[in-house]
Amino acid sequence: MKNYGSCMYCGKIDHLTNELCEDCFTEEMDNVKKIKEILAKHPNSNAMEIAQKTNISIDRITRLIKRGTLI
């Protein structure tokens, strides 16, 4: 049975993966890849520095950290 609901980022009603619609989930995975690339090059970067280098909002970076996605 598929999990349907409202995407926590955009609010679209759709099939959800980790509380995100397919579009936002794809975007989030791209963001994770960008962040991991930055952290591989600059392991001591903080959220502000990562946000500046990737143009990903601090809010999204913080959510990824809290959800354990970046561990």
Image: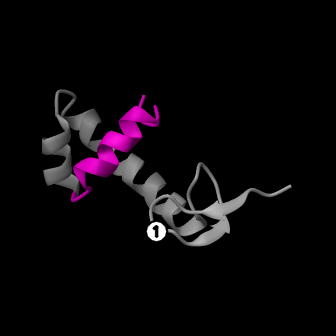
Q: Is residue 61 left or right of residue 17?
A: left
In percent of width and height, residue 9 lies at: 45, 61
In the rendered view, does 33 fall on the left or right side of 24?
left
| Quadrant (top left, top right, bottom left, bottom right) of the C terminus | top left
Q: Which residues are magenta?
A: 55-71
- Residue 29 drawn at (x, y percent): 47, 53
The residue most toward the bottom is 12
Quadrant of the rendering where the N terminus is positioned: bottom right
Q: Is residue 67 magenta?
A: yes
* 59 sits to left or right of 71: left
Residue bearing mark 1: 10
Is 2 left or right of 43, judged from the image as shown? right
- Which SS class for mark 1? loop
- When asked about the image quadrant of residue 14, the answer is bottom right
Residue 39 in picture, x, y percent from top left: 26, 35
Q: How is the image coloured?
A: one colour
Residue type at mark 1 is Cys
Q: Residues within 10 Å of mark 1 (few under 14, many from 20)?
A: few
Residue at x 45% of width, y 55% of height: 28
What residue appears at the point 56 percent right and 58 percent down from the top-left corner? Answer: 20
**Which image quadrant is residue 43 in?**
top left
Viewer-closest of 48 and 66: 66
The quadrant in which residue 64 appears is: top left
Q: Residue at x 18, y 34 (%)?
A: 42
Is the residue 12 above or below the residue 21 in the image?
below
Residue 32 in the image, given as x and y percentages of width and height = 40, 47
Instruction: Determine if the magenta segment contains residue 23.
Output: no
Q: Is residue 58 above or below residue 6?
A: above
Where is 20 relative to 65, above or below? below
Camera-side residue: 56 or 1?
1
**Of the pair 46 and 18, the residue shown nearer to us:** 18
